[in-house]
Image (cartoon, coloured by chain):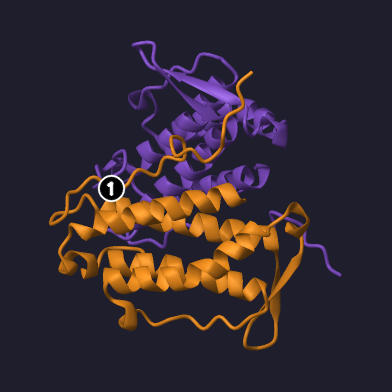
Chain colours: A purple, B orange
Amino acid sequence: MQTFFRYNWIVREQWYEWCKDLPEEELLRPRTGGVGSILQTLFHIVDVEWSWIRRLQGKPDDLENFDEYASLQKVRELDQRFKPEVEAFVAAWDNSMESRVFYDYRRDGSFDMDAWGEVMRHIIAHQIHHMGQLSVWAREKGIQKNPVSPNVIGKNLIAVQQK
Amino acid sequence: MQTFFRYNWIVREQWYEWCKDLPEEELLRPRTGGVGSILQTLFHIVDVEWSWIRRLQGKPDDLENFDEYASLQKVRELDQRFKPEVEAFVAAWDNSMESRVFYDYRRDGSFDMDAWGEVMRHIIAHQIHHMGQLSVWAREKGIQKNPVSPNVIGKNLIAVQQK
């Protein structure tokens, strides 16, 4: 589980770096599909990751409002603010938590039951999915800049064991 | 590891079903970013998954040519042909394989070393990334059909343990 979170955090940093060279109007331009702009996508990834980790812990998870974070600098600051709590939770993950139940209540009192292992994978896939969207937008008129590589291999995530 | 593969196979089937209602010309239309068309993306996912599993086993992995599979029916048939070998490998996965070394040779004899656990996560992330691209194209003019949900939760992947 930790490996995929580390992968996501590396790639996220690379997207932040990628954004640096673009004018803010391209970062904020409304795009087809997804949650809207490039910057709002990065914000959304940060916000959703933290919110799920909060909810698993039974803590309040008020979603942030993008209007207050509509610059690369502010999204990165939000990420830095949220990251320690997420990292601590991920670091403490062990397999016994996989099937632990999370009650996802609706306003009317009904609920879904999700396994913690499903929620963690949901967070992981959520970022990869949205970054797939970024990779399309990166090729659009006005940007046309090679997107960040989504490769898992080549990032030294797992030390190999040579025979 | 198995959970994410099961997730990917479920979502892939849902994309096949999603494609059924679209005219073939939309499925084959060249798109911005990614590997090209919707159908070629699905083909690419199937092809790459199988190829990596073959390579981990030290078996030949000749990549297929999309020209021979340019219909939904043919991509699904290819998937069905490749799936048993992939499923067997995934089913037999255990944690002791995580750091096993895979030598990725280039033509000039130089090589990279990847851990098997990295390769398996690479396969998983590869599909999710490309399906994020499909989700953008699904909103484009000529389609505008709700994309398949990338949610991990709600798919009964892990049985919860109630206290």
Q: Quadrant of residue A2?
A: top right
Q: Position of residue B73 (x, y in %)?
A: 29, 70
- Reply above or below: B33 against A53: below
Query: Image point 35% across, 68% down: which residue?
Result: B76
Q: Position of residue A59 (x, y in %)?
A: 55, 14
Locate the C terminus of chain B by quadrant.
Answer: top right
Q: Can the viewer see residue A155 in this picture?
A: no
A149 or A29: nearer the viewer: A149
Query: Image point 30% across, 67% down: which residue?
Result: B39
Q: Amino acid at mark 1?
A: Pro
B133 or B16: nearer the viewer: B16
Q: Chain of mark 1?
A: B
Spot the residue most to the left. B142
- Reply above or below: A13 against B86: above
Query: Image point 53% across, 32% down: which residue?
Result: A79
Query: Image point 39% across, 44% down: which residue?
Result: B150
Q: Which residue is mark 1?
A: B147
Query: In the figure, is residue B41 to the left or right of A140?
Result: right
Query: In the figure, is residue B2 to the left or right of A145?
Result: right
Q: Quadrant of residue A99?
A: top right
Spot the residue most to the right. A163
Q: Can the viewer see residue B4 in this picture?
A: yes
Crowd tier of the residue under label 1, counting other residues whose Cα lies within 10 Å: few below 14, some 14–19, many 20 or above: some
